[in-house]
């Protein structure tokens, strides 16, 4: 049943809140998405991953699900979704759903039942434990373990009026599911089948490698770490078993594709998750390269190309021939790529956007493109915390100004740099009111003030169109077997400005070279390539001559093909 469609796919990620608002209520919606499917198709995408569309109180903008089998009314109805499926099918676009199964919303009926009735079977759907009495007089109730949430603070929330707590590895409104309970896994299988029966082609599993915890639960006594408890809930002991079960009972019964969003997976586990032999997932996301200019997202550090290259290329070397890989520059959790990595965005936006796309997506793996990336959308010029809607920005700001005593201004500067909000401003379609996102209602998240300069309409009309560069690049990526299946070999990994690697498939080679800097930089074509046999297949400047030693322009990237 299983085909290789996902290996030759190009996936476009839609963040429904911010894509297109058809009814002018300030939030994106399904009819809006439908009106833009041709835009996605024309780019060269073959599949769309939708960030959550399910009923959700939106504490974490859809990543807190209150009903896994219903569409949230703010996005539309199930009929709208069925129409979306049909319109995608007509255009040859597959649909990938986001599955948030580590936790539910605290408004999910399971959780409400669990809190209401101590004897409810739903109690055991979650991880609820008695707190510990501490202090000299044993009169202070502290959480069952010292684990911290990914969103700062204790990972435990006390249940009002009791001495019990529930576990939440994210916001308090996102209680963790108890995957040890077979009834929970039955529900999950049922949910997966519900969507597969509707014709979706696969899933993106949100923070999947936290499903399995180490029992009995215990304190993390390892030396101080930003996040306490990870040894007991990342890549836990039953992870592989849980994934296999989903596969055996649901996924493998359809021609489905899966990508797991992992939280810093151990490389050994990562290999197993995606190995074709182990029958767990098809791919995972590896975000290592996105740490090349920051610590823990919000702490800036000078961009180091070696870290970027290692993160991007190592998984290609590690997994080739065993499983499959993904290639990512942006998503709804990261700032815009042209506004980071030390790039002078004002001067080199087009060059950097096309450079990043070429050197990233010509690697081995399925490209994932995040809405707006294909027109080089940038970070926003946020002026105050009140403009930031992501709760994480506020959690971290509060921690910085509170616990860490960082002055507000400095804290805001850090938040502004790493905020997820940058990715969540509405899509910039044109230069009209609200960037064409809607017809004038105030958008839920403010529009980037540069929308008159940077928008899809203007980009497409420009000689330097990022979108049209993406089109050319993706066409090669989808059709050239070497670009799809080739093995990667890296050259000069220690070079701090040049990124260079080749891809080889059945004796044919491609060479990718680029200058990841704002200064002209010398690039030397490796000796094992004969110059006479090299042809420039794609470039973001107008170079047409190949030389052994070339001075590359700022953010110049070249794809060579061996004739
Ligand atoms: C994932 C999502 C992110 C969400 C978190 C908790 O990292 O991408 O947006 O906040 O999981 O569900």
Image: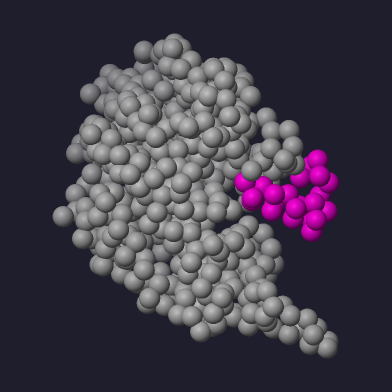
Residue 221: x and y in percent read 65, 76
Residue 223: x and y in percent read 68, 70
Magenta highlight on residue 281: no
- Residue 242, image quadrant: bottom left
Who is closer to the viewer here, 279 or 375? 375
- Residue 426, image quadrant: top right
Spot the residue most to the left.
1
Q: Residue at x 58, y 33 (%)?
A: 443
- In the rendered view, tell whether residue 539 sits above or below residue 406: above
Who is closer to the viewer here, 75 or 279? 75
Magenta highlight on residue 402: yes
- In the rendered view, tell whether residue 267 sits above or below residue 501: below
- Residue 506, image quadrant: top left
Q: Which residues are magenta?
A: 390-411
* Visual colour scheme: one colour
Q: Quadrant of the C terminus?
A: top left
Q: Is residue 196 visible?
A: yes
Residue 246: x and y in percent read 31, 65
Q: Main secondary structure of the magenta part?
A: helix
Q: Residue at x 73, y 85 (%)?
A: 133
Q: Residue at x 51, y 40 (%)?
A: 17
Spot the residue most to the bottom.
137
Residue 364: x and y in percent read 34, 42
């Amino acid at each position: 049943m299983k085909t290789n469609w996902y290996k030759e796919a190009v996936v476009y990620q839609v963040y429904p809140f911010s894509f297109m608002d058809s009814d002018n209520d300030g939030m994106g919606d399904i009819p809006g998405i439908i009106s833009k499917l041709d835009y996605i198709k024309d780019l060269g995408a073959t599949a769309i991953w939708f960030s959550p569309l399910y009923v959700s109180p939106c504490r974490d903008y859809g990543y807190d699900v209150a009903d896994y089998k219903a569409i949230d009314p703010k996005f539309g109805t199930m009929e709208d979704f069925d129409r979306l499926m049909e319109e995608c099918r007509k255009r040859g676009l597959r649909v990938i759903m986001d599955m948030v199964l580590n936790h539910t919303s605290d408004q999910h009926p399971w959780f409400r039942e669990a809190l209401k009735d101590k004897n409810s079977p739903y109690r055991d759907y979650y991880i609820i434990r008695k707190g510990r009495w501490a202090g000299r007089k044993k009169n202070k109730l502290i959480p069952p373990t010292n684990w911290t949430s990914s969103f700062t603070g204790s990972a435990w929330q006390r249940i009002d009026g009791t001495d019990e707590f529930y576990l939440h590895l994210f916001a308090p409104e996102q209680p963790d599911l108890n995957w040890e309970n077979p009834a929970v896994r039955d529900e999950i299988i049922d949910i997966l089948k519900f969507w597969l029966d509707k014709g979706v082609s696969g899933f993106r599993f949100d923070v999947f490698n936290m499903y399995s915890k180490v029992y009995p639960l215990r304190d993390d006594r390892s030396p101080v770490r930003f996040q306490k408890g990870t040894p007991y809930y990342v890549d836990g002991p039953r992870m592989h078993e849980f994934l296999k079960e989903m596969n055996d009972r649901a996924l493998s019964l359809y021609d489905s594709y899966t990508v797991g969003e992992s939280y810093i997976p151990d490389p050994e586990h990562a290999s197993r998750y995606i190995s074709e032999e182990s029958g767990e997932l098809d791919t995972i996301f590896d975000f290592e390269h996105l740490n090349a200019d920051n610590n823990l997202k919000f702490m800036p550090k000078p961009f180091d190309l070696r870290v970027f290259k290692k993160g991007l290329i190592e998984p290609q070397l590690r997994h080739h021939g065993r499983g499959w890989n993904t290639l990512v520059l942006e998503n709804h959790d990261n700032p815009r790529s042209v506004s980071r990595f030390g790039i002078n965005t004002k001067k080199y936006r087009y060059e950097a956007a096309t450079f990043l796309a070429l050197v990233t997506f010509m690697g081995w793996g399925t490209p994932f493109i995040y809405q707006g990336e294909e027109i080089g959308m940038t970070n926003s010029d946020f002026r105050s915390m009140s403009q930031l809607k992501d709760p994480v920005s506020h959690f971290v700001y509060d921690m910085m100004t509170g616990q860490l005593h960082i002055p507000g201004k400095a804290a805001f500067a850090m938040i502004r740099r790493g905020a997820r909000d940058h990715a969540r401003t509405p899509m910039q379609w044109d230069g009209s009111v609200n960037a064409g996102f809607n017809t004038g209602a105030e958008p839920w998240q403010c529009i980037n003030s540069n929308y008159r300069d940077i928008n899809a309409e203007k980009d497409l009309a420009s000689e330097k169109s990022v979108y049209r560069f993406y089109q050319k690049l993706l066409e090669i990526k989808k059709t050239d077997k070497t670009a799809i299946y080739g093995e990667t070999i890296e050259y000069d990994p220690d070079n701090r400005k040049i990124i260079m690697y080749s891809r080889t498939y059945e004796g044919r080679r491609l060479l990718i070279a680029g200058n990841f800097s704002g200064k002209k930089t010398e690039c030397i074509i490796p000796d094992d390539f004969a110059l006479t046999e090299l042809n420039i297949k794609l470039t973001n400047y107008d170079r047409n001559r190949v030389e052994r030693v070339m001075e590359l322009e700022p953010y110049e990237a070249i794809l060579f093909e061996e004739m």
